[in-house]
């Protein structure tokens, strides 16, 4: 009975889909390989090497270069996920039980791909540093918040800004483990996961309807994916590029966050950059997506 309740819980549903998507082939982006390939046409070898060893911000990569590379990555991932969604809509109503879950998994997989690419461009650390299939709790937390930004929740914007601020202040190359798994940010992660779980149910219904008619369903499904994925990716890009972590003045070093030292503030997340990130509301409140 408890297992059934867990399955119906929106937070658990989203977490399960996120973990499954992270295990799909080709979803995890190699940070070094991506930065080297993405920056190759725009930067010197010395700048690329420093961007990899430290961060693009520490290497002084210009904003217009990062903007172009980010937009290129967004266009690539949007085209790919839309084409796959359209292909999944071709079989029609008799294939719905198989195509809808598969389409949702690959959709979230491509959300993970663009989230990693944008994170690495804007000076976040490697999110999947180990070789195993497991996703550690801190990575789960920050990816959930990234997805929350993509879905337009202001509390996720504020929480991501808070995490970035911790890393910038601590000149760290690691995620703040304690803040994401036990500290004041953790309740926000759980609320964002629950919100996205509800939105997943709505998207599943929309995709089911769009795939009901063969061929026509392919066009509708692909169009629906394009119309949702592109603005979501752009929303994350806009937010990550505005954070202090992405600024050239931030010099990443080989120090780690001292867990527990940076999560004592019990106030709302509207600190420092609250006005520009829409974080003046209480941190635990989830808002409807902003257009």
Image (tube, helix red, strand yellow):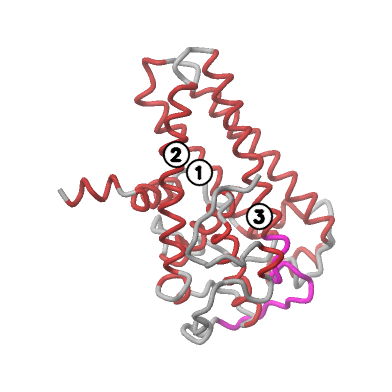
| Disc 3/disc 1 C-alpha distance (Å) | 14 Å
Residue situated in front as seen by the camera: 246 or 290 = 290
| Disc 2/disc 3 C-alpha distance (Å) | 20 Å
Q: Dot 2: few (<14), some (14–19), or many (≥20) neighbours within 10 Å?
A: some
Q: Secondary structure at mark 2?
A: helix
Label 3: which residue? 118
Q: Secondary structure at mark 1?
A: helix
Chief SS of the magenta region: loop
Label 2: which residue? 105
Residue 246 coordinates in the image, percent (x, y): 72, 67
Image-quadrant location for residue 253: bottom right
Q: Is residue 157 magenta?
A: no
User: Residue at left 35%, top 47%?
Assistant: 13
Residue 130 in sight = no
Residue 240 coordinates in the image, percent (x, y): 67, 60
Per the rendered image, the range of residues in magenta is: 240-256
Q: Is residue 247 magenta?
A: yes
Q: Is residue 249 left or right of residue 9?
A: right
Circles 2, 1 touching at the beta carbon (< 8 Å): yes
Q: Which of disc 1 and disc 3 is earlier in sequence? A: 1
Residue 200 coordinates in the image, percent (x, y): 44, 41
Residue 28 coordinates in the image, percent (x, y): 53, 51
User: Residue at left 49%, top 24%?
Assistant: 88
Label 1: which residue? 109
Q: Dot 3: few (<14), some (14–19), or many (≥20) neighbours within 10 Å?
A: many
Image-quadrant location for residue 204: top left
Q: Secondary structure at mark 3?
A: helix
Q: Is residue 226 left or right of residue 9?
A: right
Question: Is the residue 229 above or below the residue 196 in the image?
Answer: above
User: Residue at left 83%, top 51%?
Assistant: 41
């Amino acid at each position: 009975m408890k297992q059934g309740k867990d399955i119906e819980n929106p937070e658990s549903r989203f977490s399960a889909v996120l973990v499954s998507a992270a295990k799909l082939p080709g979803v995890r982006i190699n940070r070094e390989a991506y930065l080297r390939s993405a920056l190759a046409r725009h930067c010197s070898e010395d700048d690329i090497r420093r961007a990899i060893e430290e961060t693009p911000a520490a290497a002084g990569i210009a904003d217009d270069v990062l903007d172009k590379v980010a937009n290129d990555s967004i266009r690539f991932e949007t085209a790919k996920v839309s084409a796959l969604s359209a292909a999944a809509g071709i079989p029609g109503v008799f294939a719905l039980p198989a195509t809808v879950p598969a389409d949702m998994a690959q959709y979230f997989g491509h959300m993970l791909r663009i989230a990693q690419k944008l994170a690495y461009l804007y000076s976040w650390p490697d999110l999947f540093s180990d070789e195993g299939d497991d996703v550690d709790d801190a990575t789960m937390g920050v990816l959930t918040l990234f997805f929350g930004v993509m879905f337009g929740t202001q509390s996720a914007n504020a929480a991501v800004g808070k995490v970035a601020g911790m890393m910038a202040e601590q000149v760290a190359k690691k995620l703040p483990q304690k803040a994401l798994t036990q500290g004041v940010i953790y309740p926000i992660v759980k609320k964002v996961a629950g919100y996205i779980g509800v939105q997943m149910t709505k998207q599943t219904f929309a995709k089911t309807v769009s795939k009901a008619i063969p061929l026509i369903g392919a066009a509708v499904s692909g169009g629906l994916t394009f119309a949702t994925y592109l603005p979501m990716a752009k929303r994350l890009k806009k937010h990550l590029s505005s954070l202090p972590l992405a600024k050239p003045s931030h010099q990443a070093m080989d120090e780690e966050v001292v867990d527990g030292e940076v999560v004592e503030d019990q106030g709302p997340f509207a600190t420092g950059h609250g006005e520009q990130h829409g974080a003046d509301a209480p941190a635990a409140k989830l808002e409807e997506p902003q257009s």
